[in-house]
Image (cartoon, rainbow, N blue to C red):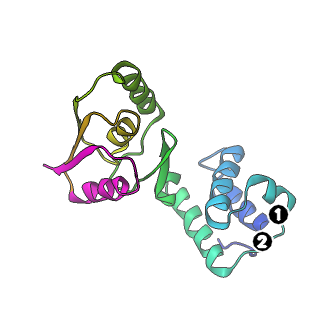
Amino acid sequence: MKIASNKLSAIMSFALKELNQMYSSEEIKSLVYYLFEEYLSVNKTDYILNSNKTMSESDLLKFNFAIKDLKRGKPLQYILSYTYFCNEKFFVNEHTLIPRPETEELVQHIINVEKDKKGLHILDIGTGTACIPISLAQQMPKHYYHALDFREEIIQLAKKMRGFITKSYSFSLWIS
């Protein structure tokens, strides 16, 4: 199936038809709003007010691929290549797990319990995106953080993420 036109409303209609077996219409709309925001900087209100706005052929192609990926069950976070964790944007890909809200709760609990201590060595085994040690280090910079994972691709992604964090703290990444 092909997208009928390059109007925003056509993308929404296409997504609703293509994804209706996998998601409710509200979930589909939410996913498309995320894509509008990411690819076109168009938020939900802009869409509602300007649903006949058009996009370029290259943007249309991006949407087509994204909807096909969603139809194959690919998570939105992998399509966008990022997710948010503890209010920080983290890179994700098919080599990492997508950080969970429950993990954010765990990180907050650790911060609440350990924030007044100094010089702890914290090891994150199976670090993935490195969201846990980076989030902890941002709140508790006086500790030493070590992250370990088994694939070079994962460590490279974590190193890329570490480069975007500007606070100074002790942090090492290893591959086993």
Left or right side of 26 for 127: left
Is 119 rendered above or below residue 172? above
- Residue 145: image quadrant is top left
Q: Residue at x 36, y 24 (%)?
A: 115
> Which residue is under mark 1?
51
| Between discs 2 and 1, the one toward the N terminus | 2
Residue 7's tag is: 2
Mark 2: which amino acid? Lys
Q: Position of residue 175 (x, y in %)?
A: 16, 51
The single residue placed furthest to the left in the displayed view is 176
Left or right side of 31 for 11: right
SS of the residue under disc 1: loop
The single residue placed furthest to the top in the displayed view is 113
Whether 160 is among the magenta residues is yes
| Magenta stretch bounds | 152-176
Q: Is the C-beta separation of discs 2 and 1 under 8 Å?
A: yes
Q: Residues within 10 Å of mark 1 (few under 14, many from 20)?
A: some
Q: Residues within 10 Å of mark 2 (few under 14, many from 20)?
A: some
Whether 25 is among the magenta residues is no
Q: Residue at x 13, y 49 (%)?
A: 176
Residue 63 appears anywhere in the view: yes
Q: Residue at x 41, y 32 (%)?
A: 103
Q: Position of residue 152 (x, y in %)?
A: 21, 58
Q: Position of residue 170 (x, y in %)?
A: 25, 43
Mark 1: which amino acid? Ser
Is 97 rendered above or below residue 41? above
Q: Position of residue 29 (x, y in %)?
A: 70, 51
Left or right side of 4 for 110: left
SS of the residue under disc 2: loop
Position of the N terminus, as image quadrant, is: bottom right
Depth check: give the residue in front, 154 or 6: 154
